[in-house]
Image: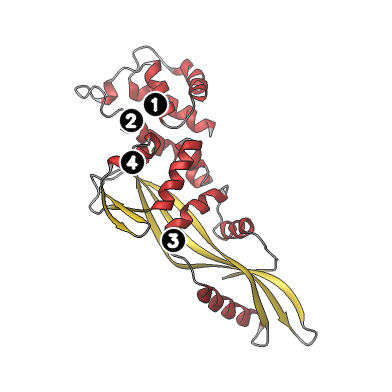
């Protein structure tokens, strides 16, 4: 547990302390709020036990304390897995952040501290890229629902041994996120760790979008067209105007007769540079 001599009053401050504890760079609070739905709720009793132990160890058994407020903060760490079904895997750990007033001594002097502590085991969230693509397209209903457990929904996804189990609030929020920003920008919200995944994840999604085109010709052999590249970029969640700006920057590197795979690599590089 980390004890900081500081008075915190808001959830945003609690998130910042949890991110600092894990030495994350550039992660946005919105990512923490999104993955909070994937965690079990910490009870006040659990927090009280942690605070009691920390205060007694740090300030002695004669110290008195009072929890002003406390928050559960989700800290998600993404990684990309290409084996089997290409997926984004997010390891999310719950952190308890408590604002505590401590009183001690003959003069009954008091001060505020913040306690930051990870709780329980990390929760792994599997996000197959085919399912992310369905969310982008707004047709996630094509994955058959095979079970319900309260607010959790189980979907059948080809290539997975077990049904995909996701919280309804998480799926609804992620759907809303993709209406506001493309996948590349969303990954960048994870900070430096997410930014490094942009080329891998976006590249795989581009391949998924065009896997069915010209089935008799391998995708790497298909000739690109400007319209096809515009479709790819807008399909990732970018607006048409933004897609055109990306193409304008990429066009000096595009050549006549270049395959779709070669062209999308160039487009992907410029998309990654833009986020």
In-front residue for pair 135/106: 135
Q: How many marks?
A: 4
Single out the mark in the foreground, 3 or 2: 3
N-terminal of the pair, mark 4 or mark 2, is 4
Q: Are marks 1 and 2 in contact (CB under 8 Å)?
A: yes
Q: Is residue 217 left or right of residue 168?
A: left
Disc marking residue 140: 4
Q: Are marks 3 and 1 in contact (CB under 8 Å)?
A: no
SS class, disc 4: helix
Alpha carbon separation for disc pair 3 and 2: 31 Å
Check the image and name the residue furthest to the right. 107
Alpha carbon separation for disc pair 3 and 1: 34 Å
On-image quarter of the N terminus? bottom right
Q: Are marks 4 and 1 in contact (CB under 8 Å)?
A: no
Neighbour tally class for label 3: few under 14, some 14-19, many 20 plus, Cα within 10 Å: some
N-terminal of the pair, mark 3 or mark 2, is 3
Alpha carbon separation for disc pair 3 and 4: 22 Å
Q: Which residue is mark 1?
A: 232
Q: Which residue is mark 2?
A: 209
Alpha carbon separation for disc pair 4 and 1: 19 Å
Disc marking residue 39: 3
Neighbour tally class for label 2: few under 14, some 14-19, many 20 plus, Cα within 10 Å: some
Check the image and name the residue furthest to the top. 256
N-terminal of the pair, mark 3 or mark 4, is 3
């Amino acid at each position: 547990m980390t004890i900081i001599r500081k008075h915190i009053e808001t959830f945003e401050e609690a998130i910042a302390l949890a991110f600092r504890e894990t030495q994350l760079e550039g992660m946005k609070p919105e990512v923490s709020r999104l993955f909070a739905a994937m965690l079990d709720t910490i009870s006040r009793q659990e927090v009280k036990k942690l605070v009691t132990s920390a205060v007694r160890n740090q300030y002695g058994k004669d110290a008195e304390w009072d929890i002003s407020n406390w928050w559960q903060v989700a800290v998600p760490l993404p990684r990309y897995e290409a084996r089997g079904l290409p997926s984004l895997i997010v390891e999310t750990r719950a952190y308890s952040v408590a604002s505590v007033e401590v009183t001690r001594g003959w003069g009954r002097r008091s001060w505020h501290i913040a306690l930051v502590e990870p709780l329980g085991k990390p929760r792994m969230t599997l996000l197959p890229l085919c399912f992310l693509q369905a969310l982008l397209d707004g047709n996630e209903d094509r994955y058959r629902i095979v079970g319900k457990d309260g607010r959790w929904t189980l979907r059948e996804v080809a290539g997975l041994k077990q049904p995909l189990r996701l919280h309804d609030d998480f799926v609804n929020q992620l759907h809303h996120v993709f209406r506001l920003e493309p996948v590349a920008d969303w990954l960048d919200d994870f900070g430096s760790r997410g930014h490094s995944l942009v080329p891998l994840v976006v590249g795989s999604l581009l391949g998924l979008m065009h896997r069915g085109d010209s089935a008799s010709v391998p995708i790497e052999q298909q000739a690109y067209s400007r319209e096809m590249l515009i479709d790819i970029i807008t399909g990732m969640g970018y607006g048409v105007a933004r897609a055109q700006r990306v193409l304008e920057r990429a066009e000096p590197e595009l050549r006549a007769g270049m395959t779709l795979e070669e062209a999308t690599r160039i487009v992907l590089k410029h998309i990654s540079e833009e986020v």
